[in-house]
Amino acid sequence: MKAWINCDLRYNTTLPKTHPPVSKGQHFFRKSLPNDFLVQVPDQLGALPTRMQNLGAHLAHNKPLLTAGTLILSGPTLTGHPKTADEALPITGSVLIFRTGTEDEVRELLAVDPLAKAGVWDLEKVIITPYRCGLWRPY
C-alpha cells in the first residue's frame, strides 16, 4: 500500500515525522516540505525542427537536475497520441515539475534550458502553478 500513496505523508517513511497524528480521512501537507511547481510551456509556432535539433542538449542539461531532485518529471505535450509507433509525435510544448524554493527559481531554470535558449519555448506564455503531489504510483 505504501508504494501507492508515498506522497501521502502519513505513509512516507523518508521524511521525518514532525507533525501531530492525523485522523483517518484528514488531508494535510506539512509546511516544511519543498515547493513543487507544475510548469506548462508552449512551443513557438513552427519550432519543431529546432526542438529536435536541440533535444539532445536539453536532455543532457536536465539529467543533473533530475538526479539532484530539482526536476521531478518532464515531457512533451501533444495535440493527440500517435496512432502508430512510427508516427511522429505532434509536440506542442512541454510539461515539467520542479522541486525548488520559489517561482523565480523556476523561471531561472527555464531560461537556461537549451530549448529556451534556442527559441523553442514561448516563455511569455509559460504557466507556473504551485503543486503538491497527493498520490502517485511508481513505474
Image (cartoon, rainbow, N blue to C red):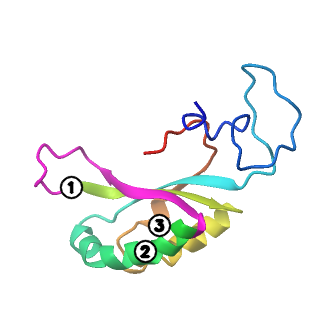
Residue 3 lies, with reference to residue 90, above or below; the image says above
Relative to 113, 98 lies left or right? right
Q: Residues within 10 Å of mark 3 (few under 14, many from 20)?
A: some
- Viewer-side residue, 31 vs 13: 13
Q: Residues within 10 Å of mark 2 (few under 14, many from 20)?
A: some
Q: In percent of the image, x 73 and y 34: which residue is there?
A: 10
The residue carrying mark 3 is 123
Which one is closest to the eye, mark 3 or mark 1? 1
Q: Would residue 94 be seen by someone viewing this image from the given angle? A: no
Q: In percent of the image, x 89 and y 34: which residue is there?
A: 20
Residue 99 within the segment the image draws in magenta: no
Q: Are marks 2 and 1 in contact (CB under 8 Å)?
A: no
Q: Secondary structure at mark 1?
A: loop
Relative to 71, 51 lies left or right? left
Q: CA distance from mark 2 to mark 1?
A: 20 Å
Circle 1: residue type: Leu
